[in-house]
């Protein structure tokens, strides 16, 4: 019996993967017992008995799914042939990079419209082509951006563009439609949840992950600018030196915590007078997505 396969309990409905004597492959029955040698006794629907290894048996529901399975859409091909927008994010985009910093790339691809007509839908995201590249299908990307996901919004505002087609240029042109007061909740909520975990690290290890602390403080600074000025600032600007000091662990935890709490308070104040709308312009984004699907169907990119 394969160690990777779970043991089958008596009464489990199974299908024979291969013929056993006069019993054809695909015959169904129920497990009646497990022998000392790891093989199973199976009583078929017609009353006959079979003895099978675990590898020779499939759960009935799983077997049916296997038989109707279709080839999945190749994510690597989508990224290679259908990326409309890709940028460098992370420390290099924020002006906080060091010699050891990775070059993290994030992209958006538009799956061919006919691909959605198949049983196998295009993936909503793809890891690759290397460890530092991650992409979203345009619909999923827009969905996350409308919810003010910080990582997604930063993709739309990164100055380090790797690839941009006319469709990608249109997407960037829509970036103000994604901005709303939801950013207050997503940015501050994410930082708060992450700091709780970092505080646990600090109590346990005597130090947190300082690089992560730096990026969380930077998120709050970006959110403050967004709420105050209606624009998303990517570069750390005048805060670069102090943020890098945080990264190196040169600021006491208590000082960093005071900085964080003061920024949370400033976000609340900025929210009260922000020019950002309460909700994003979903209708505008949705209308654009419709045109993308239609043009893609016609072979226009």
Image (cartoon, rainbow, N blue to C red):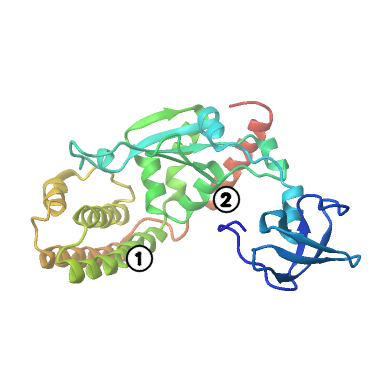
SS state under label 1: helix
Q: Can you name the residue that lies furthest to the right here?
A: 46
Which mark is in front, 2 or 1? 1
Residue 179 percent location from the top left of the image: 41, 51
Quadrant of residue 137 in the image? top right
Q: CA distance from mark 2 to mark 1?
A: 26 Å
Please name whichever residue, 232 or 143, is drawn nearer the observer in this view of the structure.
143
Q: Quarter of the image containing the C terminus?
A: top right
Please name whichever residue, 72 or 194, is drawn nearer the observer in this view of the structure.
72
SS state under label 2: helix
Viewer can see residue 268:
no
User: Relative to residue 90, is residue 33 drawn left or right?
Assistant: right
Please name whichever residue, 255 or 188, is drawn nearer the observer in this view of the structure.
255
User: Relative to residue 170, is residue 72 drawn left or right?
Assistant: right
**Which residue has dot 2 on it?**
283
Q: Residue at the location (38% across, 55% down)? A: 276
Residue 73 percent location from the top left of the image: 62, 38
Task: State yes or no: discs 2 and 1 in contact (Cβ < 8 Å).
Answer: no
Considering only vertical position in the picture, is 33 above or below 209?
below
Considering only vertical position in the picture, is 9 above or below 137?
below
**Which residue has dot 1 on it?**
189
């Amino acid at each position: 019996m394969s160690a990777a396969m779970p043991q089958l309990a008596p009464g489990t409905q199974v299908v024979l993967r291969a013929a056993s004597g006069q019993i054809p492959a695909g015959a169904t029955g129920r497990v009646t017992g497990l022998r000392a040698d790891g093989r199973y006794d199976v009583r078929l629907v017609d009353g006959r008995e079979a003895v099978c290894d675990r590898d020779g048996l499939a759960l009935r529901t799983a077997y049916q799914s296997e038989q109707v399975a279709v080839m999945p859409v190749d994510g690597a091909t989508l990224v290679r042939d259908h990326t409309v927008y890709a940028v460098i994010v992370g420390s290099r985009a924020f002006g906080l990079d060091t010699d050891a910093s990775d070059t993290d790339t994030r992209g958006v691809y538009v799956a061919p419209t006919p691909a959605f007509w198949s049983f196998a839908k295009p993936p909503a995201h793809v890891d690759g082509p290397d460890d530092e590249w991650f992409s979203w299908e345009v619909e999923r990307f827009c969905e996350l951006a409308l919810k003010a996901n910080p990582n997604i919004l930063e993709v739309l505002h990164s100055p380090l563009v790797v690839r941009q087609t006319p469709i990608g240029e249109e997407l960037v042109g829509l970036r103000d439609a994604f901005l709303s007061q939801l950013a207050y909740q997503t940015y501050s909520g994410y930082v708060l949840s992450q700091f709780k975990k970092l505080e646990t690290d600090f109590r346990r290890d005597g130090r947190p992950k300082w690089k992560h602390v730096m990026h969380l403080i930077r998120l709050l600074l970006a959110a403050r600018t967004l709420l105050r000025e209606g624009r998303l600032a990517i570069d750390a600007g005048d805060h670069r030196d102090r943020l890098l000091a945080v990264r190196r662990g040169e600021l006491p935890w208590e000082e960093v915590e005071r900085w964080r709490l003061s920024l949370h308070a400033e976000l609340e104040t900025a929210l009260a007078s922000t020019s950002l709308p309460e909700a994003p312009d979903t209708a505008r984004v949705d209308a654009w997505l419709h045109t993308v699907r239609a043009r893609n169907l016609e072979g226009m990119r």
